Image: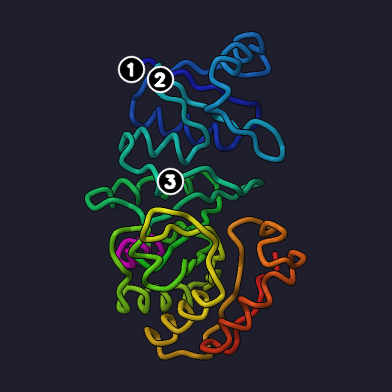
Amino acid sequence: MVISLYTAPDCLRCTIVKAFLAEKKLPYAAIDYKERKDEFNAFYRGNRPAIYRNPEGVEFPIFHDGKVVRQGSGEIIAYLLSGRALEGSVTRSDLLHGWISGLYPSQCPAGEEDKYAELVRHLADGGLKVHLQSDGRRPDLLERLLAAGNSSRLSLNVLGPAEVYAASFGASISKADLARTVALAEAFPKGEIRLLVSPVKRADGSVSWLTREEAREAAKMVADATGLPGLPFFVAAVTDLMPQGLLGLEPFAQFLPYRSAVREHLFRADIAQY
């Protein structure tokens, strides 16, 4: 495997990946995109569909081994540890300035737990503040990651009622797993528990936005699993602004029907402010 690593000056994420490659004794060619603009631009033009840009431009580092392109420290290290096994549980980070997200331990495949823990350790040891996101499944792995002390923030994203989990993942979420994950999020200093309003998969394979009734059922599921109707709970969207017109309302007002539905079972629920 011939590894090319496209980097930027003073790039913390690049330094983390370089340290990982050195630790694993994997040879690579580092290409600074500013010093070798022509080479990087040719690579960029040839692989543009696989390269994303965050609000501040192209994110570095970018990894290429002649077969795949991976971008960002999380995705690159995950690929080097496990090939494609961690895809879905490690995705693009939407956080900048010393933070990293895109880490979903609930979706880590069985047998990959040690590598997932190693990934999180490398990111934290390299100086990034790690944001873990759970959907309530795999509390065993989440507890292990939190106990290691490498995480700075935890979001428990309740995706909907049990039927939504079954359609998305092939199996419902257990009350025991949900209750245990809620307890972990409550105990974590930077933990939050929220309903994540997003498009969800249906039993027939279609995708549509979570409904108000499903929000009510999800809140009941949490209240029943925990016995905590006064649990601090937030309503948030998968994107900064839900598509205007979803409920025929302005962005903030779109959350109000969800909040009122959730409050029927979790009376302290409110709209997340970010």
Label 2 with label 1: CB-CB less than 8 Å:
yes
What's the residue at 56%, 65% (across, down)? 197
Question: Rounded to the nearest whole Å, what is the CA distance between mark 3 and mark 1?
Answer: 22 Å
Question: Rounded to the nearest whole Å, what is the CA distance between mark 2 and mark 1?
Answer: 6 Å
Q: Nearer the viewer, mark 3 or mark 1?
A: 3
- Magenta range: 138-147
Q: Which residue is mark 3?
A: 90
Residue 202 on image: x %, y %: 41, 60
Question: In the rendered structure, which disc, 2 or 1, sits on the residue that comes first in sequence?
Answer: 1
Q: Is residue 272 above or below residue 126?
A: below
Q: Is residue 75 above or below residue 156?
A: above
Q: Residues within 10 Å of mark 3 (few under 14, many from 20)?
A: many
Residue 193 on image: x %, y %: 52, 73
Residue 131 on image: x %, y %: 52, 57
Q: Is residue 54 left or right of residue 151?
A: right
What's the residue at 41%, 64% (across, down)? 146
For mark 3, give the secondary structure.
loop
Please state which amino acid type lies under the numbered disc 1: Met
In the drawing, what numbered circle is on residue 19? none
Q: Residues within 10 Å of mark 2 (few under 14, many from 20)?
A: few
View extreme (top): residue: 38
Could you say which quadrant of the image residue 137 lies in? bottom left
User: Magenta segment: does it hold 144?
Assistant: yes
View extreme (front): residue: 204
Label the magenta part by its dominant secondary structure: helix
Could you say which quadrant of the image residue 252 lies in? bottom right
Q: Which residue is mark 1?
A: 1
Q: Residues within 10 Å of mark 1 (few under 14, many from 20)?
A: few
